[in-house]
Amino acid sequence: MNVQRNVDLKPFNTFGLPARAKYWLELDDAARLPEVCTLPEFERERVLWLGGGSNVLFDGDYDGLVVHMANLGIREIKRENGKVWLQAQAGEIWHDFVLKTLDLGLSGLENLSLIPGTVGASPVQNIGAYGVEVKEVIDSVHCFDLDSGRFVELSNAECEFTYRESIFKQSAKGRYVIAAVTFVLNENFVLKARYGDLAAVLRANCGDRVPGARDVSQAVCQIRSSKLPDPAVLGNVGSFFKNPVVSASDAADLLAEYPDMPHYPQADGSVKLAAGWLIDQCGLKGYRIGGAAVHDKQALVLVNQDNASAENVKDLEKYIQDCVKKRFGVVLQAEPNWLR
């Protein structure tokens, strides 16, 4: 295996923060994961399994081994009763995979179009957008268990998915390396367009015609492209903060003062709020600390405006959290993980 030293990590994190890896390994075959664990550079507590780098922020150089999951491949497992089980390797680019499913005449992932990152990262964060979470279409996750040194198959239930959370971020953090994900997709399209802006764009694009899966994907791409900067042009990690979930009584108090506040009742009685709206109401669009700034079109996104440092980003993150808490009494949690 070709382990490199002192590798520049700036091209491998979408925010573009400066950092270097002490050791670096490009892994294009997940079957070699047991071999990785025998390398002299491998220290379980200091290894970083890196996908697209779209949900990480480097707080300085990484003093350990970075394994870049670059394994590719998509295969059909089975078809049954209008459902298709499709397995994708962890290194597949997420949006490319979504487009491939559309080419195959399958639906279920169209609302998740243009989300940055890789297939392997999608279960970790339980990525979601426009009323759909990836947990709704995941059948199982193929992992390498560092505890046992064996490959295992975790069912959807075993992944313990919740809003932007999973077993991979919580009780089993650091235990499993995701090698591939199996999705259950539909041969027959079911429209999911509850979010107002998506429904409006579909009406404008399709007129009286009933939208299909590709129409939804194109509409989502249109909306995201109009609001969110391309990481290749302006460094960012997409949505920087989770949408906060508050109690029904707290939501009622806020709505009494802010009747136009976007809010989404949840099945358990709690209410999800729009983090971007809360930040925007604090007048923070375009606000800047050093080289880090709040995007001027979407307050939920922080951007690398001009060679931002990790300190710039951390200071901006805290300032936004303090502003929102002071005005609304709501605590915002960041989505990306800080690494060092």
Image: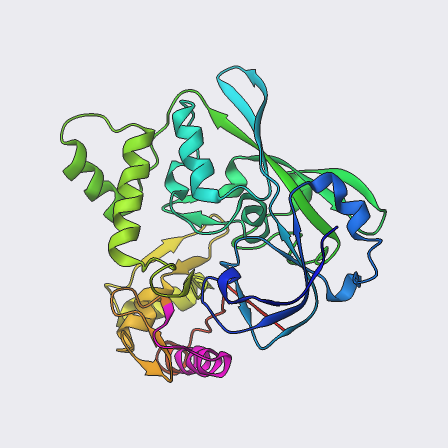
**x, y percentage for residue 1?**
75, 50
* Quarter of the picture holding the C terminus: bottom right
Camera-side residue: 275 or 96?
A: 96
Image point (58%, 26%), residue name = 75
Main secondary structure type of the part rendered in magenta: helix
Instruction: Tell me if 185 is positioned left or right of 179 in this view.
Output: left
Instruction: Tell me if 93 is positioned left or right of 198 in this view.
Output: right
Q: How is the image coloured?
A: rainbow
Instruction: Tell me if 168 is positioned left or right of 229 in this view.
Output: right
Image point (41%, 43%), residue name = 112
In the picture shown, does residue 100 fall above or below 38? above
Camera-side residue: 31 or 175?
A: 31
Camera-side residue: 198 or 96?
A: 96
Does the stretch in magenta take in 144? no
| Residue 236: quarter of image | bottom left
Instruction: Tell me if 277 is positioned left or right of 309 in this view.
Output: left
**x, y percentage for residue 264?**
37, 54
**x, y percentage for residue 120?**
59, 46
Q: Which residues are magenta?
A: 302-322
In the picture shown, does residue 251 fall above or below 148? below
In the picture shown, does residue 313 fall above or below 262? below
